[in-house]
Amino acid sequence: MSRRPLSLLTLALASASGALVVWFAAFDVARLRALDAGAMQTFTGVASAPLQPSIRGVAVLADPIWFLGGCALLTVLALLRRRWIMAAVVPAILLGANATTQLLKPALADPRAIELRGVQLVYGSGPSGHATASMSLALCCVLVVGPQLRPLAAVLGAGYAIAVGYALVVLGYHLPSDVFGGYLVAATFTLLGAAALAALEGRAPDRLARARPPAPISVPALAAGVTLALACTGAAVVVAAPGMTLSALQHPTAIAAGAGIAVLGLALTTGLAVVLRR
């Protein structure tokens, strides 16, 4: 775990600033607002009826019941690793990030009229709660697992969060900017929690945890795990994001939005894994 809380706090500030920029661009910059709406219209247009139940099945993986189950599982994992402070910090990160998103949605909302398939709809929400939930779980998984498993956790976590993000846009539940905002809120709270963890463990090191370092993992096993994770991620994207079909490839805005969600999701999880290097 990094022993540089100030660096983590700086990254948290950068993430929070990014979320503010996304909100401002989505609500107050007319050109970007139109591109945001155009991207979602393209994504929703290619969601064929046979795939919709599967796509909804991906979106519900960030519902409250799944989120609370993931929170409990990660807390237990921290306890099994005898990281007592981490076991307290992880629920604080998860609940703090998602409670903040729920408070921001009505506080920052400004109705945005969007036309989808000839129907005029109004979107007023800001950060996506499901995007926040999925990304916060992914990032906390990277935080909780041992150093040698972080690359695998980062890729799997990114695949999960990206798939949920795509599903939200394809189903018309959220605009791409809402997904970006939710990811960045989750990253901000995870970095704040990681900074607190580094500071607290630096003052009161967990000798018992240090006395039993994680068992080494072979390079072939790790490579096989990463390969499997990439395959699973690709499969999830195909199922959750039919926007990557020929229809969507005719729309540069949709390509940019889809690539943006994927790049941000992967950058946040892998970036955290790098920052937490021992």
Image (cartoon, grey):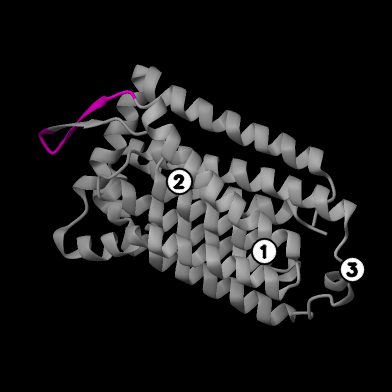
Viewer-nearest of labels 3 and 1? 3
Q: Amino acid at mark 1?
A: Val
* Image position of 254 with respect to 123: above or below: below
Q: Which residue is drawn at the image coordinates 46% and 70% (left, top)?
A: 232
- Relative to 188, say whether 159 is above or below: below
Q: Which mark is residue 261?
A: 2
Q: Which residue is mark 3?
A: 207
Q: Which residue is mark 1?
A: 144
Label 3: few (<14), some (14–19) or many (≥20) C-alpha neighbours in 10 Å = few
Q: Which of the image's four quarters has the C terminus?
A: bottom right
- Position in image of residue 185 (x %, y %): 53, 40
Left-right relation of 121 to 27: left
Give the residue type at disc 2: Ile
Label 2: which secondary element: helix
Q: Residues within 10 Å of mark 2 (few under 14, many from 20)?
A: many
**Residue 264, can we see it?**
no
Is residue 16 within the magenta segment? no
Front position in the image: 1 or 259: 1
In the image, farthest residue toward the left: 118
Range of the magenta residues? 110-119
Judging depth in this view, the residue of 166 and 211 nearest the camera is 211
Q: Does the magenta run of residues contain 116?
A: yes
Residue at position x 39%, y 18% from top? 28
- Drawn side of residue 209 relative to residue 50, left or right: right
